Image (cartoon, helix red, strand yellow):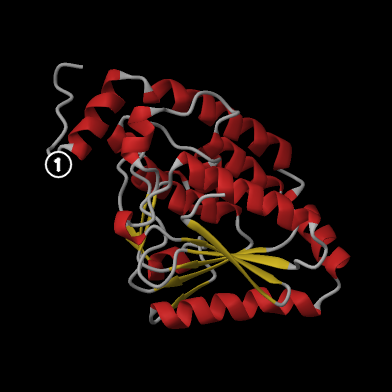
Amino acid sequence: MSAHILTEREGGVLILRMNRPEKKNALTRAMYKAMAQTLTQADQDASVRSVLITGGHDCFTSGNDVADFLQAPPDGLNSEVFMFMQALFDFSKPVVAAVCGSAVGIGTTLLLHCDLVYVSRDATLKMPFVNLGLCPEYGSSMILPRLLGQAKAAELLLLGSAFNGEQAAAWGIANQALHDSAATIAKAFDMAQRFSLLPPSAVTDSKRLMRAPDREQLRQVIAAEGELFSQRLHSPEAREAMTAFMQRRKPDFSNL
């Protein structure tokens, strides 16, 4: 279990918190593995009625740790990041997210697989995959055009444009935008706690029915995205983009 993933129980709510503030909760392979294991165990624990995912009051997550990716890019669908994606995708119980501060890359796309999402108004969400020489992941290339329309999805995925919490709520990515981080986390916890008062099998059956129509197609899209994402991590474009990020300079794609 990673020291940067903290878990806490409050009644029927399992709180999963990304806790690497010195790196803006950037996700490493160990953190992905720990989150995958936590979700798998929680799904099998009848006393857990819901999971609340948060990064705390200051930052949700800045996405993948670029240095970690450069050192050991995920290779195939058995890598830690895809283990986490699969665990969240297959999780049968309600998942609630509380998003404060930055939510970058998978910090935004994982929200598309949560059941309830609460954000602070000044949160900053962004999916800069193309900017890093990569491609959309975690089903975002399918979910976002259907949710937002092709034009808005292209703005967010092809240009990597940032948006705030109020926009996330207006577009249906989040349920509600709250005025500050304390209110956001409190609201998310309150909603997660409500599932402890409901008949658990009725909740999980209803979640399964809601997700069933597109489930297998979405699973295939996630796998196809993941395969291409892994390939692109080894591309000259991605290497230049991520090296430039580490060196705090603008990338140069003119000769690629």
Q: Is residue 8 visible?
A: yes
Picture coordinates of residue 50 (x, y %)?
70, 67
Picture coordinates of residue 119 (x, y %)?
45, 70
Nearer to the camera, 170 or 81: 81
Nearer to the camera, 70 or 8: 8
Q: Quadrant of residue 245?
A: top left
Nearer to the camera, 34 or 65: 34
Query: What residue type is disc 1 on?
Result: Arg
Picture coordinates of residue 38 (x, y %)?
64, 53
Q: Is residue 209 left or right of residue 178?
A: right
Q: Is residue 145 visible?
A: no
Nearer to the camera, 144 or 198: 198
The quadrant of the rendering that contains the C terminus is top left
- Please give the count of numbered marks on the rendered protein: 1
Q: Eyeballing the image, is 80 above or below 212?
A: above
Which residue occupies 39% across, 57% down?
20
Which residue occupies 40% across, 50% down?
152
Q: Which residue is mark 1?
A: 248
Q: Quadrant of residue 73?
A: top left
Picture coordinates of residue 128 (x, y %)?
33, 43
Q: Eyeballing the image, is 110 above or below 119?
A: above
Q: Is residue 95 left or right of residue 242?
A: right
Q: Is residue 93 left or right of residue 226?
A: right
Estimate how packed mark 1 is, as few (under 14), some (14 to 19) or many (20 or more) residues with alpha carbons within 10 Å. Answer: few
Secondary structure found at label 1:
loop
Which residue occupies 80% across, 54% down?
44
Q: Eyeballing the image, is 120 above or below 104?
A: below
Which residue occupies 60% across, 58% down?
114
The residue positioned farthest toward the top in the image shown:
255
